[in-house]
Amino acid sequence: MKILKGESTLPSKNEMLTEFSKDLEERLENVGSTRGYHRLHQTAEPYFDSLSRLGNLRKTPRIVFEIYFSGLKYMLQDFHNFRKRIYHIVDEEKYSITMRNS
């Protein structure tokens, strides 16, 4: 909304293409192919931080990423039941998990 309201601006096309090329090179160095390029979980926090800076927005709290990675871990470990976990944010540094019945 900040961009639409004129409170923030997007980078130029050249800046975006340069950033894209840099990101692709870094991912190729780390992964070795473009096969996993879409897997944002490896770079989620820096990506969202860059979006926050771009839009002059508040930084995404670290606890959000911790919950995201916890959910991802449980999805990979127990796919049939991972959706039963309900996350409760206790404060800026802690969360708890309860299990939903059925």
Image: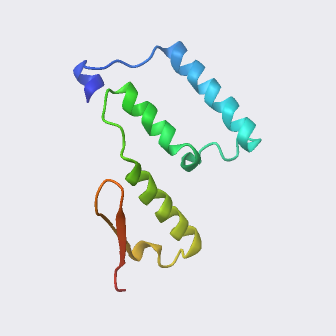
**Quadrant assignment for the N terminus:** top left
Q: How is the image coloured?
A: rainbow
* Numbered label tally: 0
Residue name at image x 36 percent, y 43 percent: 60
Q: Is residue 53 left or right of residue 42?
A: left
Residue displayed at 67% across by 37% down:
27
In the image, taking residue 55 as reference, residue 77 lies left or right, namely: right
Give the residue drawn at x 28%, y 63%: 90
Q: Position of residue 10 (x, y in %)?
A: 39, 19
Q: Say left or right for 34 vs 73.
A: right
Report x, y in % for residue 57: 31, 32
| Residue 19 found in image quarter | top right
Q: Along the horizontal axis of the image, is 42 left or right of 66?
A: right
Using the image as rendered, state which of residue 47 and residue 6 is in the foreground: 47
Q: Position of residue 39 (x, y in %)?
A: 59, 48
Residue nearest the viewer, comparing 75 with 90: 90
**22 lies above or below 92:** above
Query: As drawn, which residue projects farthest toward the left?
Result: 5
Q: Quadrant of the C terminus?
A: bottom left
Closest to the observer: 41 or 64? 64
Residue at (58, 73) in percent of width and height: 77
Looking at the image, residue 81 lies above or below residue 66: below
The furthest residue to the right: 32
Relative image position of residue 96 (x, y in whole percent): 35, 69
* Res 68 → quadrant: bottom left
